[in-house]
Amino acid sequence: MDIILLGPPGAGKGTQAKFMVDKWEIPQISTGDILRGAVRDGTPLGLEAKGFMDRGELVPDRVVIGIIAERLREDDAQRGFILDGFPRTIPQAEALEEILTELGRNIDHVVSIDVDDEELVRRLTGRRMCKGCGESFHMVFNPPRTEGVCDSCRGELYQRDDDNEETIRQRLKVYNDQTSPLIDFYRGLGKLREINGTRTPPEIFSDIVSTLSG
Ligand code: AMP
């Protein structure tokens, strides 16, 4: 199972990826998580990426393609993977095709989760993430049992630096301009599976399971 999760920020890619990890026991590979880790650790990669991320812009293709080329060669990715947040541009998608060809592999499904922009803004402005396990909450739609504390691991909740309205609008613009052309790219390859993302997470997941096995 080599799968791409495609969709705008706030569509629920991370949430669905976690369900998929549990069901199929293949890793979630999130370029956003890898970059945030590098920013936190203050590595050269993090220093290069931080400005782009804070402005809601894309980190240069060469940087994220390098990350993915290495990550897909690791042992845990040999049985399959779920790409969450990569590719985000046509050159990234083309580079991915080349990397996979070299590895003798092929994307099986591109799951495209669709949610309209105003709903995404509502979701992202209220989003809180767990520092420990990465679980996400929403202050109004899905609040944690104790304010500021993760229900699953008791970790501390925080708001991502880029989850403020101005940066959110910029990220949505970048998605619409640079990432949404991937929908036609993968439709042309016969790999696109379109999913309505305005339902509950378990409903969306059961739709994904039936779409991928159908
Ligand atoms: P995400 O967690 O997927 O929303 O990503 C957060 C930020 O990381 C994005 O707004 C970009 O600045 C950067 N980023 C993550 N993945 C990519 C990618 N595939 N290409 C370029 N930038 C990325």
Image (spheres, rainbow, N blue to C red):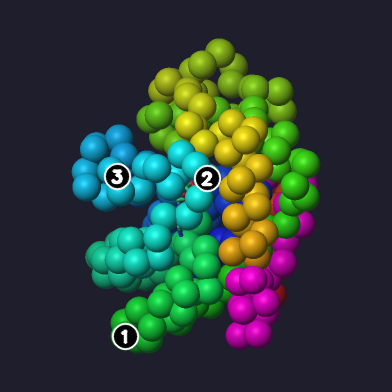
Viewer-side residue, 55 vs 146: 55
Counting residues from the start of the chain, the first of labels 2 and 3 encountered is 3
Counting residues from the start of the chain, the first of labels 1 and 3 encountered is 3
Q: Is residue 139 left or right of residue 87?
A: right
Q: Does the magenta stretch include residue 198?
A: yes
Q: Mark 2 points at which residue?
A: 56
Q: How crowded is mark 3: few (under 14 residues within 10 Å), some or many (20 or more)?
A: some
Viewer-side residue, 98 vs 198: 98
Label of residue 67 in the image: none
Residue 206, horizontal then vertical, whole percent: 69, 56
Question: Disc 2 residue type?
Answer: Gly
Residue in view at x 49 percent, y 18 percent:
149
Question: Disc 3 residue type?
Answer: Gly
Residue 185, horizontal then vertical, whole percent: 62, 79
Q: Residues within 10 Å of mark 2 (few under 14, many from 20)?
A: many
Question: Disc 1 residue type?
Answer: Glu
Counting residues from the start of the chain, the first of labels 2 and 1 encountered is 2
Label of residue 46 in the image: 3
CA distance for labels 2 and 3:
15 Å
Q: What element carries label 2?
A: loop
Q: Which residue reaches farthest left?
A: 43
The reply to whether the residue tagged 1 has its Cβ within 8 angstroms of ligand 1 is: no
Residue in view at x 78 percent, y 41 percent:
118
Q: Which of marks 2 and 1 is in front?
A: 2
Residue in view at x 45 percent, y 71 percent:
92
